Image: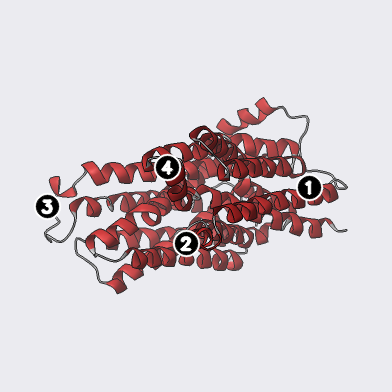
Amino acid sequence: MKLSYIGIKIFIVTIMFTALSLFLQVLPLSTAPYFEKTLFLHSSTFIYLTSVFFISYSIMQVPGGIFLDKYGIRKILPIFIGLTSIGVMLFWYSSNSYMILASRFIAGIGCSIGYIASIYVAAKFFSPRRLPMLIGIIEAASEIGTLSAANPLTYLIERFGWSLVGVFISAFCVLLCILAVICMKQLANYPQEVAPKTTFMEYIKNIPIMLKNKTLLALFVYSFSTWLVIMSFAGFWLNSYLQTMHHYSAITSLHCIQIYWISFIISSIMIGFFIKSGKFAKMALIFLALLGFSAYSYMFIPILFDYSNILLVIISGGISAAGVTIAFSLIPHFVKPEQCGSAIALNNTFIVLGGYTGQVLFATLLQKFDVNDYIHIVGDSHINHHYYSALIIYVFFTLVGLIAALTITFSKEPIVN
C-alpha cells in the first residue's frame, strides 16, 4: 500500500475530526435549552460551565503541536479523538453541573489538535503546491461542523429526541476513533518524520525563536486580526445589528450569516485550488486583506444601508476571510519540517486569542463606547450609536491585517514554491 494512499485516508479522518471539533465548540448553542430545563440552570451559568472548553482548548494548542512534532500523528491522533469521545459522552449524559464542567474541559483537550492535525497531515503527506487547496477543504469541513451544530442539530433533537441523538453523536465519535486506530496501524510500516531525540523543553525553546521571525510574526498577526473579525462580525455583531437597526426577523438575520459562511467556504476552496506558488499566495493575501478593509470601511459610512448593500458587505467580508487559509498554507514554508506542527499550533493559538478578543471587544464597545462622543458623524436617529460604533473594530483590525499582509509579501525571508 502506497504512503500517499494512506495519507489520503488519514487526511479524511483528520478533516472529520476537525468538523467534529468545530461542531463541539458551538454545541452549547443548541443544547442549552435542554440543560436549562432539566438541571434548572440559568443561561449565564450554563455559558460559564461550557466555556471551559475554550480554556483547555487554548492551553493545549502549543503543547498539541509539539506532541505532533515529537511523536508524530500515529501516536497522537487516536489518543485525542478518544479523549474527545469521552468528553462528548459525559456531556450528553450529564446529570449535574460538575459533569458538564468536566466533560467540556476534557472535550476541549481532545479537540485542541483537531484543526492543526489536519494541516499537519496536509503538509507532511502532500505536495506544497496542494497545501492551499487542502487547507481550503479543511476550512470547509470546519464550517460544516459549525453550521451542523445550529439549526440541523436543533431539528434532530426535536424530531428524534435527546437520547437518540446523543447515541448517534457518541457512536460517530467512537467510530472515528476506531478509524484513526486502523489508519495509524497501517502507517506504522512507514518511517515517521519526527525527531524523537529532541526533548519537549527544546521544542518549547523554539517558540521564542519563531516569534522573532518577522514573516512568521506577521502571519500570526494577520491570522489573529482576521479571525477576530470573523468571530465577532459573523458570530455576534451582524445578527444583533440586523435585528436591532433593520428590524429583520431572526430567520432573515440567520440567512445573512449563513451567506457569510458560505462565501467564506466557497472562496477558501476556490482560492486554494488556484494558488500554486508562494508568490501568488502572498499577492492573494494582499488582495483579500484589501477587500476586507474596503468592505468594512464602506459599512462604516453612517447611513442605514439597504439589503443589497448589506449583502455586498457580507459577501465581500466572507471572501476576505478566506485569507486565513492562505496564512496557514504559508507557515510550513518558513519553518523546518520538524517544527511544522509547533508553528501551525502557534498560529492557531493566535486565532483562538483573536476570536476571544473580538467577542470581549464587541461586548465592551457595545456597552461603553459611542463614536459620537468623540466625532459627531452619526446624524440619523434610526442608527443605534453603540451597534454602529462597534464597527470600528472591523475597520481597525482589517487595517492591521492589511499591514501584516504587506509585511509578509515584501518579506525577504526565502519561500519554497
Q: Is residue 277 above or below residue 184?
A: below
Disc nearer the start of the sequence (2/1):
2
Q: Label for residue 151?
A: 2
Q: Nearer the viewer, residue 380 or 147?
A: 147
Identify which amino acid the numbered label 3 is placed on: His
Q: Is residue 303 above or below residue 45?
A: below
Q: Quadrant of the C terminus?
A: bottom right
The kind of secondary structure element at disc 4 is helix
On the image, numbered disc 1 is attached to which residue? Answer: 181
CA distance separating discs 1 and 4 = 33 Å
Front in this rendered view, residue 62 or 46: 46
Figure quadrant of the N terminus: bottom right
Q: Tell me, yes or no, whether the two marked residues, 3 and 2, touch with CB atoms within 8 Å.
A: no
Q: Amino acid at mark 1?
A: Val
Report if the CB atoms under discs 2 and 1 are less than 8 Å apart: no
Mark 3, Cα crowd under 10 Å, few <14 / some 14-19 / many 20+, is: few
**Residue in the picture at 38% in, 66% down:** 256
